[in-house]
Amino acid sequence: MDKALTFLKNTFGFDGFRPPQAEVINTLVNGGDALVLMPTGGGKSLCYQIPALVRPGCGIVISPLIALMKDQVDALLLLGVNASFLNSTLDHQQVFEVEQALRDGNLDLLYISPERLTQERTLALLQEVSISLFAIDEAHCVSQWGHDFRADYLQLSLLHREFPSIPRIALTATADARTREEIISRLDLIDADHYLAGFDRPNIRYTIGLKQNPKPQLLRFLKDAHPRDAGIVYCLSRKKTEETATWLKGEGFNALPYHAGLNAEVRADHQSRFLRDDAVIIVATIAFGMGIDKPDVRFVAHLDLPKTIESYYQETGRAGRDGAPADAWMIYGLQDVSKLRQMLDQSEGSEEHKRIEQHRLNAMLGLCEITSCRRHALLAYFDEASPEQCGNCDTCLYPVDTWDGTEAAQKALSVIFRTGQRFGVNHLIDVLRGSENDKVFQFDHHKLPIHGVGKELDANQWKSVFRQLMARDYIRVDVDSFGALRLEEKCRPLLRGDESIFLRKDVKTRTVAKQTKTMLPEDIDIGLWEALRECRRRLAEAQGVPPYIIFHDSTLQAMAEYMPATLDEFSALSGVGERKLQKYGPEFLEVIQGSSHSLDQATP
């Protein structure tokens, strides 16, 4: 561990490990296997990068996204680490050069996709060389129950079979108990040590509201809380992604679409602009985000309901990696519930798969409909204890009112039953409210005793009742009957009056104010801060890398706060290793000294 600490300080510029990094690194250095669950931004990469440097040989990192390998390798090269990648973006000559560097023992880390790893040519190459460890990043991709399933990950059990003496580490930020079991089983990590660092991201504020008028709701959120910030907006369909990005551009935002249907070059360009430029908003399907290392994403917005809590946690976790305040904002409606249920029913999965996915969808709906703390419920899903109130979610900041919805629920269930479980929500509401439109007369529903008994609630209130009954599994959507609502067995006691139900009072989406707490101290010299950012931007542009690869905001803040005057003082800043000290120290010191000189001249 002395060597590990030396690399931590001299290469990466940090004085100490975060829990449980030291324990994980010690396990791998000593030849053991590890399964690591650590929240996004928690420092997972150091858990395999440092052991790869300490142990003899090259560390092999299996990564699912070739688009991100270059940025990860660029960051390591700037630190003086000999790193490279093998993927389909390289031509034959480049592949030959990387393979030769590996044979010659000139690489510390090699990033590779699972598809390439499992090729016979690659396996034969790896058998020839010295390997320090195998790191399987985004390990939840191995789970067929997971939200980012990759079939190629299923073959990675061969690592234990073909290289039994090489330590392996599997890492992910998102895995419930079932997914963890599947990772262990499919990657043959039965004897691996387990490290769970906790799932809480206290800097993220969770807000979930009803979808009433999506575009104006999103626009209000962005203008009130994030007018000039980088962020991600998630949509369920490619078409909606394109439309939303175009609309946001028209509203003055620098918005770009991202989905699997776009040309690969366009996707890569949009991702690159998001990583390198300030205040870019990516409007994306779930095809975007896994492995994204941009630290200053200030918000993640969902215009549609995610399928599972794992998906929601993984996607919202891309905000606030730098530890500064960030927002996870979502709106959803009855149509989202219906659409996801239909997609699930129409899937080709087994009945067991559908049953488990139905359970996960219900858990996601439950998170939306609860009246208690969102964070407490979110962490409980991952079996993590937490205070009953976090003070940083919408239900804590603005407690939810409830009402006795027993009678309304009975009327809603009754109208479904009396109309033959053949109609969608809009027609059922028309019957309850006593409408005399053509469809009501066509089916003689004006003659039913239930007709007109629900005039005390308006259409939106009735939609809320049906939505909450669906979320709690009293009713379901029948995809074979064009969205007709059907009763579930669970509804019998409620319909008979043997149980009661309290429902949440829906309110219009609340204004989300910009969080006043920032990373910058109140007494910081803003002029110096901006000059440091400009210096970083210029260096990053010259080298074709994202600005955060040069230095994170936290390191710039330390420069502005402590104003080092010498390279020795500069080297004491967190995030400044030996290579970055030599490469960038003089330029940043010049900026700091120029600011100090200006301040001296301005002082009377």
Image (spheres, helix red, strand yellow):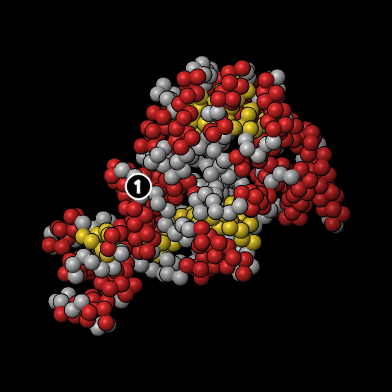
Side (left or right) of 180 relative to 50: left
Residue at 61%, 49% in the rendered image: 264
Residue 499 vs 436, above or below: the answer is above
Q: Residue at x 20, y 76 (%)?
A: 443
Q: Image quarter for residue 584? A: top right
State the residue in front, 455 or 357: 357
Asked if residue 79 shows in the view, the reply is no
Q: Position of residue 51 (x, y in %)?
A: 59, 24
**Lateral position of residue 559 relative to residue 117, left or right:** right
Q: Residues within 10 Å of mark 1 (few under 14, many from 20)?
A: few
Which of the image's four quarters has the C terminus? bottom right
Q: How far across and down, in percent of the image, does residue 55 sit?
A: 61, 19
Residue 442 placement: quadrant: bottom left
Which residue sits at x=34%, y=60%? Answer: 338
- Count the labels in the image: 1
Residue 198 on image: x %, y %: 45, 38
Horizontal and vertical percent for residue 289?
Answer: 55, 47
118 and 573: which one is in front?
118
Q: Nearer the viewer, residue 148 or 310?
A: 148
**Is residue 579 in sight in this rendering?**
yes
Quarter containing the N terminus? top right
Q: Is residue 510 above or below residue 23?
A: below
In the image, is 379 to the left or to the right of 100? left
Amino acid under disc 1: Glu
For numbered disc 1, what is the local secondary structure?
A: loop
Residue located at (82% from left, 42% from top): 587
Quarter of the rendering containing residue 109: top right
Query: Which residue is labeled 1 in the image?
Result: 348
The correct choice, above or below, for 583 with respect to 333 in the image is: above
